[in-house]
Image: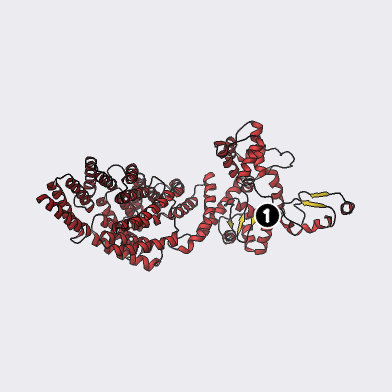
Amino acid sequence: QTLLHFLGQTSQRWLLVYDNADQIEPGQLLPYLPRTGNGHVLITSRNPNYGGVGQVLELGLFTLDEAVRFLFQRRGAEVQRGSAEWAEAERLARELGRLPLALEHAAAYVLARGSSYAAYHRLFTERQDDLWQRAKKPERYHATITTTWELAFDQVKQTPGALELLNLCCFLDPEGIPLALIRQVAGLETSDFLKKSDVLLAQIVSDELALEDALGALRRYSLMQRTADELTLHRLVQAVARSRMDEKLNQNWLETALELVLRSWPFQSRQMETWEVSKTLLPQLISVADLANAQKVETERTATLNSHIDFYIDFFGNKQAALPFSQRALAIREKALGPDHPDTARSLNNLGSLMQAIGDLAAALPYFTRALAIREKVLGPDHPSTAESLNNLAALLQDLGKPTAARPYYERALAISEKALGPDHLTTATYLNNLSYLLRTIGELTAARSYLERALAIVEKTLGIDHPTTARSLNSLGNLQQDMGNLTAARLYYERALTICENTLGHDHPDIAIYLNNLGNLMQDMGNLTTAKQYYEHALAIDEKALGPNHPDTASDLNNLGFLLQSMGNPTAAQTYLERALIMRQKIFGPEHPIIAQSLNNLGGLLQDSGDLAAARSFFKRAFAIREKALGLDHPDTALCLNNLSTLAYYEGDYAEAARLMRQALAIYEKRLGPDHPDTVTSRNSLAAIEKKGSS
């Protein structure tokens, strides 16, 4: 009281500091605050409840730039932004969560030992606990990272469930833990795996007042922040809390977190209402999966967790990001269940599909082959899972340019599905779509249309008219209508598919690029080259970002743009795109794949237009040889190669050879496409022109 009286009376300026007022509530401190006087009061506390006492100045984390500058200023060093040393300091600052005290520990360690931030980062990753034990108290500060939070941990123990809640959150993603997920712990109370501490937490979250008390205690000591819907905590708080656990307790809470996220995971690819909540929960699954992987927890439950993550990320188009989770799931199942277990076959199948989507077809084949062998042996030849393996193997063989080998696998898969699942099942629709695509590629368009229309009817009835799977069926019908020469009908299918996909999957999904490319192809066929170019460029931008620069779809985008630029009279730019596409495709598929023939034909056409007929002939002949071997002599794509060779012979003045080649192409078109197809009509007219020129 004497001090307060003096401060109220003196004319001198003064500052009164109450330091570390963590355990004192604002009401307890109010009697000790001066009411008048020529000064200020500064209260430092981790207790967030002082907002009613005065103006709050929250001391948050450094920005990334501030953190890096602090690291170098602490060493007395000047480092150029953008240098390798600056980049390493940024990585360390991110790892330390931009927490000033943690950055001080790092700087002091490096300064004392003449080390580098790269070396400290490596040690921190590998031996975090040892580094903290060696940490010294900073000058003018009384505690280290560990001792700072140890005191807080001891305090929150006094509130039932608070420490248990913190322990659980230490295995979840700290950037935003949904409170709704925490409340799901109540549903785990009767499960077999819950230990005593877990049961206490389950009881706490079942009682709203008790949960609020636990959250309040954690917030009071700055161990956790909360909004109405989420909890956040610092990564180093998590790390220190985990380091306090013995091996048994750590395993217990990891298992609890694992069970919690698995039971809460709602994602169903065909139920769009599950997508948004799954997006929110995904970081929690990844956090648990990464910690389980680091601790070598290899059980069927962790395999399932990795499979969930793989499937979700893959579904939304990020194939490369999905790959490590798919590989983890397979490795765990082979070890935990054995090499011939049906679930191991499922992981083989999933990884094969992912490798195929990435473009590594050779790597995908042994995964599919092994999965099929396991399923036929263990589940039987007529099981739906066996049909899935048959279908996937067929799709891969088709991608490898072996449609004849693929067809019986597709047909067998469809027969199994119709019998085991029913003629109107979505899986049956998938196999109908796939078989239709194969029939389209080998020129059996009427049969292909019948399968596609049946598949679309199933999908619309089951999933609705605005589902991404419906969009894919519409897109396939658009492809077929375009092949049959019905361009107006094709456009309607493509545009409807694009609209559905944009509304459901977003504007940067790889499926968008497929529909944009198809619209570009159609616009080109209709003579609207400027619009076609816009579609192609948009598709290329999406695929380069989503799939990478060495993916088959990116190569197709380059090929489409090159072919279009040639049609628009820009041969130099066209050749650049076409050569990039050819090099990329040869790297991905090998030199004899039918798709290589497309690039060769396009480059041959460009060279022909440029007057280099000898080089053009070399490309055209190689394209013909590839397609004749892979597709057969009477395939429409082989006929296109004959057409190109005929045109070249015509330019060279060899009208007899040009007519012979065009007759051969025309016979194929009439047989495969019918007498009224645009390609048939074009070939017939070209033959008439050649014969007229030859007789003049």
Kind of residue at badge 1: Leu
Q: Residue furthest bottom?
A: 461
The number of discs equals: 1
On screen, residue 422 above or below 63: below
Q: Specify whether residue 420 is in view.
A: no
Quadrant the N terminus occupies = bottom right
Q: In the image, residue 298 lies at what x, y percent?
A: 49, 47
Q: Specify whether residue 678 is in view.
A: yes
Is the image coloured rainbow, by chain, by secondary structure, or in one colour?
secondary structure
Q: For this rendering, which residue is in front, 370 or 281? A: 281
Give the secondary structure at mark 1.
Answer: helix
On screen, residue 234 above or below 139: below
Q: In the image, residue 495 lies at what x, y percent?
A: 36, 62
Give me the residue at 44% from left, 59% from top: 505
345 lies left or right of 11: left
Q: Residue furthest left?
A: 695
Residue 457, by quadrant, is bottom left
Q: In the image, residue 314 lies at what x, y percent?
A: 43, 53
55 lies left or right of 468: right
Residue 107, by quadrant, is top right
649 lies left or right of 528: left
Q: In the image, residue 494 lies at what x, y percent?
A: 35, 61
Q: Which residue is mark 1?
A: 218
- Near mark 1 (Cα within 10 A), the count class, few <14, some 14-19 or many ≥20, is many
Give me the residue at 64% from left, 39% from top: 71
